[in-house]
Amino acid sequence: MSEKNLNNILSNSVSKSDQFIDSPLIMMQPMNIIVLLVFYSPVIIAVCVLGMSFIFQNFKGFIYLGFLLGISVFREFLLMILGVKSESNPNKICNMVQYSAYGNSGFSLFVISFTLAYICTPMFVNSDVNYLIFGGLLAYLFIDIGIRYMKKCITTYTDVFLNIFTGLLSGVIIPGLLYAGNSSKHLFFNEISTSKEVCSMPKKQQFKCAVYKNGELIGNT
């Protein structure tokens, strides 16, 4: 085989590989639906958790969203301070949604990891784990890693590890602080508990009584 033919074969294989990576998504193909679920995962997860507030008529989803936005801003600021260069991935699909100027490809890993720890920490604290939710979020995380690696959006294990580690750490610290401040009632547990039973010690209550005689107030106790 001549050198010219070999170069033609290599160039064709590279062009086909690039075409696969940057090819437009056809919605009728199940694989492309999974790709969309991966690249829009931060939005999907935030909407699902927020929707639980409307289903159970509480503000826990809004509290989660507030913490998620706050910790995401802190992540952005920290990456900027550390001098991380702004990400410019040549693959168009990797820039389908721009969540962050720094580490955009790993942002979804951070969000899924944070949500996993934030929702599941109360389960482990109360020894009542909803394995359907825990397993679902864990599977979503691994699918996200696999699709992004296949599309060459993430190429280093360090990026994957740091985003997962910081997400999990943040998701554990925040519920821990809420427990320390006696504000654990703002966390998700009752709604996703497998037994739906949660016991708590009521606060000490005081009663005030008014004593009347012949319709006139004669004292309070």
Image (tube, rainbow, N blue to C red):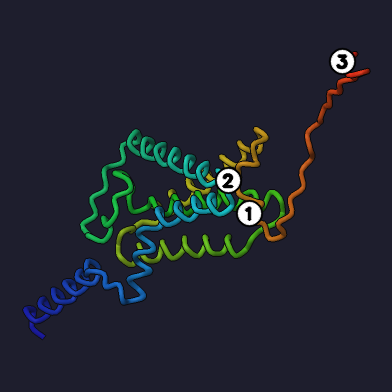
Q: What residue sits 88% from the left and 19% below the top? A: 215
In contact (CB < 8 Å): disc 3 and disc 2: no
Callout 2 crowding tier (Cα within 10 Å): few <14, some 14–19, many ≥20: few
Q: Which residue is mark 1?
A: 191
Q: Secondary structure at mark 3?
A: strand
Q: What residue sits 23% from the left and 50% below the top? A: 88
Q: CA distance from mark 3 to mark 2?
A: 42 Å
Along the polypeptide, which appears first: circle 3 or circle 1?
A: 1
- Pick whichever, 7 or 132, lies toward us: 132
- Pick whichever, 193 or 127, lies toward us: 193
Q: CA distance from mark 2 to mark 1?
A: 10 Å
Q: Identity of the amino acid at label 2?
A: Asn
The answer to which image quadrant residue 45 occupies is: bottom left
Q: Identity of the amino acid at label 1?
A: Glu
Q: Give the position of the N terminus as an image quadrant.
A: bottom left
Q: Give the position of the C terminus as an image quadrant.
A: top right
- State whether residue 175 is above or below residue 7: above
Q: Identity of the amino acid at label 3?
A: Leu
Q: For marks 3 and 2, give the one nearer the viewer.
A: 3
In contact (CB < 8 Å): disc 2 and disc 1: yes
Q: Secondary structure at mark 1?
A: helix
Q: What residue sits 31% from the left and 76% below the top? A: 28
Q: Is residue 198 left or right of residue 53?
A: right
Determine which of the numbered discs, if any, sits on residue 217 in the image: 3
Along the polypeptide, which appears first: circle 3 or circle 2?
A: 2
Q: Which residue is mark 2?
A: 58
Outermost residue toward the top in this view? 218
Q: Position of residue 101 (x, y in %)?
A: 29, 44
Q: Is residue 2 left or right of residue 115?
A: left
